[in-house]
């Protein structure tokens, strides 16, 4: 074979390999990089990705700080590989800089449901037979009872009283199941045990617990915390929010986390006088208002998701009766995808002191703010049970966006 033929074959093979690698890179970035970007007015939008740039879809010029001066504007943009190969079209939203106070302080939660949640159904002994009235009616665990025979119910004792006073007559239940409104007819039966009418239902109308405040907004008096929603312990579904209070908490001890068993911050409500109100219970945390800032620290910038990097960071959390302390962690991976609203970060505690005292992440630390490069980048949400030094976090941008929506709703209710 001639040398020229060998050369061209090798060149063709190299070209094929480059095309394959380029295609693989385009596919990877198309999936992993978000479709929407939020950037502060006056700052540049840079992507620390090998060979990836972002250009204005119309002018084909790279987006810089000079082109992002006015807030509340949007740009159609194009992600490019090596400034030549299109990856995908994206949207760039220019926003005003958001400053929030990172907290890391514990808070007590008292949440009352909108309706009552069915957490169990039971068999009833009646006339020598075993019957399950709730199951016969088609009611299921996780259903939210909103009214019975047209009467609104929000407390479990209301449900019991209506069933007991029914005289065995059929009752029309209005329920919500997976956000769908349904009706069911339940016929109470006379219990052989105590001679009263029963429906075979276990219901819950409230919950209480301890979490950590992520941030406080000094401009509005609102806060965000937990980084995940409050779910019912039996159904594992989000508790339907009716109303709620924030009360002060004192941390009294720590159950150290171990492989296979999550640790826990132990504490108690040190007063029944509320220090704030809950406004929303969402999959991405709880939000509401506080009477004052829990800490005296200064507000910092909320990082846009593209500004969050793998590498060293710090969390602020309270593990004793004192004030929040900073502890070293490492952000191991980041899920930038827009569909991921909660488990955006994988983090690992590296601070020797925190590892010694808690074993890593423990229950009650959910909501502890994550700081990187002087910015609020996220909050701790979950611990890996089999590796308590590691866990998940949520991006601060996601929490701040929900907090803004909650604040707007509060303003609308007040006006």
Image (spheres, grey):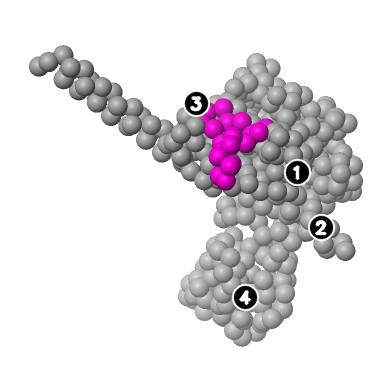
> Which of pointers 3 and 4 lies earlier in the amino acid sequence?
3
Pointer 3: what residue? 50
Q: Is residue 163 left or right of residue 299?
A: left
Q: Is residue 308 above or below residue 292?
A: above
Residue 129 image point, x, y percent: 47, 75
Quadrant of the frame with the N terminus? top left
Q: Please name the residue shown 36% across and 29% down the image.
A: 21
Which secondary structure class fits the magenta region best? loop
Q: Could you give the CA–CA distance between mark 4 and mark 2, rounded to whole angstroms?
A: 28 Å
In this view, 112 is above or below 37: below
x, y percent for residue 398 = 66, 44
Q: Which residues are magenta?
A: 44-64
The residue shown at (82%, 62%) is: 412
Q: Is residue 53 magenta-colored?
A: yes
Quadrant of residue 43 within the rendered picture: top right
Residue 115 among those drawn in magenta: no
Front position in the image: 126 or 399: 399
Q: Nearer the viewer, residue 15 or 382?
A: 15
What is the quadrant of residue 318 in the picture?
A: top right
Q: Pointer 4: residues within 10 angstroms few (<14), some, or many (20+)?
A: many
Does label 1 or label 2 sit earlier along the sequence?
1
Q: Determine the residue positioned at 28% across, 23% down.
A: 14
Q: Earlier in the sequence, mark 1 or mark 4?
A: 1
First in sequence: mark 3 vs mark 1 = 3
Marks 1/4: CA–CA distance: 49 Å
User: Any mark on residue 410, and which?
Assistant: 2
Q: Tell me if I can see residue 116 in this picture.
A: yes
Element carrying mark 2: helix
Q: Secondary structure at mark 4?
A: strand
Which residue, given by chain and number where applicable, does mark 1 sit on? 70
Q: Secondary structure at mark 1?
A: loop
């Amino acid at each position: 074979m001639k040398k020229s033929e060998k050369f061209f074959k090798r060149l063709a093979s190299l070209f094929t390999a480059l095309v394959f690698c380029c295609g693989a890179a385009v596919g990877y970035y198309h999936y992993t990089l978000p479709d929407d970007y939020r950037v502060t007015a006056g700052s540049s939008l840079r992507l620390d990705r090998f060979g990836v740039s972002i250009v204005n879809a119309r002018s084909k010029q790279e987006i810089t700080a000079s082109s992002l001066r006015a807030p509340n504007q949007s740009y159609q943009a194009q992600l490019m590989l090596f400034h030549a190969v299109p990856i995908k079209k994206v949207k760039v939203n220019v926003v005003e800089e958001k400053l929030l106070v990172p907290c890391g302080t514990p808070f007590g939660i008292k949440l009352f449901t909108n309706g009552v949640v069915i957490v169990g159904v039971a068999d009833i002994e009646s006339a020598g037979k075993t019957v399950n009235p709730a199951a016969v009616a088609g009611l299921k665990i996780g259903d939210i009872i909103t009214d019975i025979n047209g009467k609104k119910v929000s407390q479990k004792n209301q449900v019991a009283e209506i069933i007991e006073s029914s005289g065995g007559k059929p009752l029309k239940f209005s329920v919500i199941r997976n956000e769908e409104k349904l009706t069911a007819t339940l016929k109470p039966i006379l219990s052989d045990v105590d001679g009263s009418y029963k429906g075979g239902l276990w219901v819950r109308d409230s919950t209480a617990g301890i979490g950590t405040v992520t941030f406080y907004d000094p401009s509005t008096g609102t806060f965000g915390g937990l980084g995940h929603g409050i779910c019912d312990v039996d159904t594992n579904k989000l508790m339907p929010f009716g109303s709620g209070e924030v009360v002060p908490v004192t941390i009294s001890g720590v159950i150290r986390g171990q492989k296979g068993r999550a640790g826990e911050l132990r504490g108690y409500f040190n007063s029944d006088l509320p220090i704030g109100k809950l406004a929303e219970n969402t999959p991405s945390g709880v939000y509401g208002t506080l009477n004052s800032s829990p800490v005296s620290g200064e507000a910092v910038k909320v990082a846009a998701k593209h500004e969050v990097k793998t590498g060293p960071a710090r969390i602020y959390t309270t593990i004793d009766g004192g004030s929040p302390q900073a502890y070293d962690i490492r952000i191991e991976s980041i899920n930038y995808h827009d569909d991921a609203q909660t488990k955006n970060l994988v983090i690992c505690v590296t601070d020797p002191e925190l590892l010694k005292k808690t074993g890593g992440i423990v229950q009650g630390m959910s909501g502890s703010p994550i700081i990187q490069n002087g910015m609020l980048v996220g909050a701790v949400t979950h611990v890996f049970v089999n590796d308590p030094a590691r866990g998940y976090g949520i991006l601060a941008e996601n929490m701040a966006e929900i907090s803004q929506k909650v604040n707007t709703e509060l303003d609308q209710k007040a006006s």
